[in-house]
Amino acid sequence: MSGQSIKLTIDKRSIATLTLNRPEVHNAVSLEMIREMRKIIAELNSNPEPRGVILTGAGKTFCAGMDLRWMQKISTQNRANRIAEATELSEMLNELDRLNKPLIGKINGHSFGGAIGLISCCDFAVAAEDAEFSLTEVLLGLLPATISPFVIRRIGAANARRIMLNAHRFSAKEAVRLGLVAKAVSSQSLEEEIEKEITELLRCAPEAVASTKSLISEVRGKEPQAVREYTIEKLADAWETESVKEGIDAFFSKRRPAWSQ
């Protein structure tokens, strides 16, 4: 499905692309966009066809953050409505973070405010080297509250203090140093770099990839002993899948497995 503010396409390789599609306002996130995103995430989670998802923005900007007209409207609402709309934003971020397929950020341009939260929900991201980044909330008297768990998990508390407290504007090169994005490449090379990542992904068993993403979510931040039984069970589960049978047979038969493209 595609809405007015988000475009979803799936190519012949079963790679989906989610495009923030409000270029006239630099893809600023509105309440409508949040609701569309949640519906699309639910569709992707229930659809076994897509093997990976690319998140990008239409035009020259990835995302300018939250729509200021929406923010202006929220300022006139009562507390209950503010809580309700903040909850929708928080739930969308959590659902995006837990998408059951690899999510690759294709950061095609400037990324401010809430855009940093979207990037932090990606499994990894590649940015155009001329993109600039900033957590701009404090300039408006706001806090990067709902995105903070994802951003801090991604770059660490020390780095978060560096960029959250003063709306520090930073380059794609610094975004790599902070750990926000994996690579920064020229705008002309961005598509090629994303294709390289997709090529690597398509070598891998979709079932195993999805289970590995879930595994990472479950064990991150925990001591090995605390998740020992869980990891043993997950490995035993993997040995019972059709994927491992196909993968091992393909290895010994010196052929490509069925999923490899």
Image: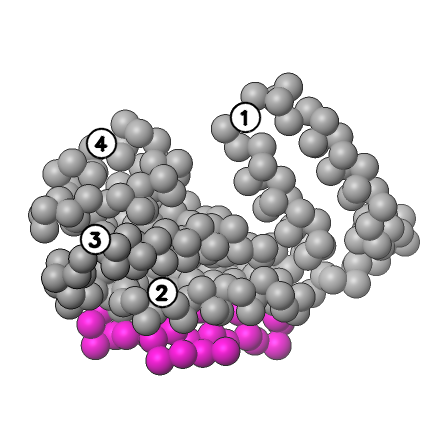
Q: Residue 161 carries which label?
A: 4
Q: Earlier in the sequence, mark 3 or mark 2?
A: 2
Residue type at numbered disc 3: Arg
Disc nearer the start of the sequence (2/4): 2
Q: How far apart are the alpha carbons under marks 4 and 3? A: 28 Å
Q: How far apart are marks 2 and 4 (CA)?
A: 27 Å
Label 2: state its secondary structure: helix
Separation of marks 3 and 2 at Cα, in angstroms: 20 Å
**Residue extent of the magenta highlight:** 1-26
- Location of mark 2 (residue): 34
Nearer the camera: disc 4 or disc 1: 1
**Residue 222 tag number:** 1
Q: Would you say 77 lies left or right of 93 here? A: left
Classify mark 1: helix, strand or loop.
loop
64 w.r.t. 212: above or below: below
> Which label is found at residue 79?
3
The first of marks 4 and 3 along the sequence is 3
- Work out how far the residue at label 4 is from the one at label 1, CA to CA, in angstroms: 23 Å
Image position, residue 23 (x, y; %): 25, 74
Closer to the observer: label 2 or label 4? 2
Q: Earlier in the sequence, mark 4 or mark 1?
A: 4
Residue visible at 50% across and 78% down? 1
| Residue type indicated by callout 2 | Ile
Q: Evaluate whether residue 115 shows in this view.
A: no
Q: Inspect the image, locate mark 4, and give the three-letter code of the amino acid beneath it.
A: Arg
The magenta stretch spans residue 258: no
Q: Where is residue 172 in the image (x, y as percent from the top left)?
A: 28, 49
Q: What residue type is labelled 1?
A: Lys
* Sequence-wise first label, 3 or 1: 3
